[in-house]
Image (spheres, helix red, strand yellow):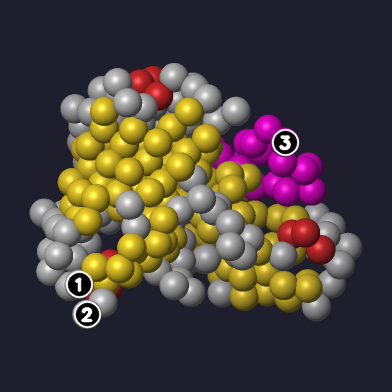
Amino acid sequence: QVQLVESGGGVVQPGRSLRLSCAASGFTFSYYSFHWVRQAPGKGLEWVAVISDDGNNKYYADSVKGRFTISRDNSKNTMYLQMKSLRPEDTAVYYCAREEKYTGSYHFDQWGQGTLVTVSS
Amino acid sequence: DIVLTQSPDSLAVSLGERATINCKSSQSVLYSSNNKNYLAWYQQKPGQPPKLLIYWASTRESGVPDRFSGSGSGTDFTLTISSLQAEDVAVYYCQQSYTTSPERMYNFGQGTKLEIK
């Protein structure tokens, strides 16, 4: 079955870096675009970044542009989010999500369970 | 950037009654070339990731109960639960994925918390 599993979260000091991973299984990873979406404690959903199926196109929310980098390794069925210069306001559960491919509607049809990132001194 | 505003922020409805959640976009999300609205609805229960309910503003995802329906076009959209069940207690989000620029943005509404009255 389709599965997305995030990892790499934890507690990190402000200004430091962290890399999240999203491992996919149960489908052909290289066919799909993927996203990172985050949710601060008790808050709503915030879209973070997207990467195309071939990795050539990447877009970011203004709040993370220049600090976060999305990437993927299709040979490993894994997507990444490199986060630098972390701020307390980056504290959130980070979800990876698959973008549906066949309708062209760009909605997210599969989600992982999320990994918690806490930025605190 | 397109901003999505949901109303109300929270809602309490009796079991078996209708629940209605609105989502207003600051710009039209209707793409004229295919007459499709790039608007989706998600349900998030406590401690769980979001779950897709509706896309194209009114197309129900496979497996979603038919008591959930979406309507609207352009800038104004509605998610309706025709007969509220206990398992529908959740936060509901609308999301847009419309853009005419090379940059793609996928922002969400602020969410509507649905509870049982």
Which residue is found at the position 40% from the left and 62% from the top? A116
Of the residues under marks 1 and 2, which one precedes in the sequence? 1
Q: Mark 1: few, some, or many residues within 10 Å (few <14, many ≥20)?
A: some
Disc 2 marks a residue whose amino acid type is Ser
In what element is the residue under mark 2?
Answer: loop
Disc 3 marks a residue whose amino acid type is Gly
- Give the letter of the chain under mark 3: B
Disc 1 marks a residue whose amino acid type is Gln
Which residue is found at the position 12% from the left and 69% from the top? A15
In screen coordinates, is B74 left or right of B88? left
In what element is the residue under mark 1?
Answer: loop
In screen coordinates, is B28 left or right of A86? right
Label 3 belongs to which residue?
B63
In three-dimensional space, the C-alpha distance between marks 2 and 3, rounded to whole angstroms, equals 44 Å
Q: Would you say the residues marked 1 and 2 are in contact, meaning their CB atoms lie under 8 Å apart?
A: yes
Q: Which residues are magenta?
A: B54-70
Given residues B50 and A25, the one toward you in this image is A25
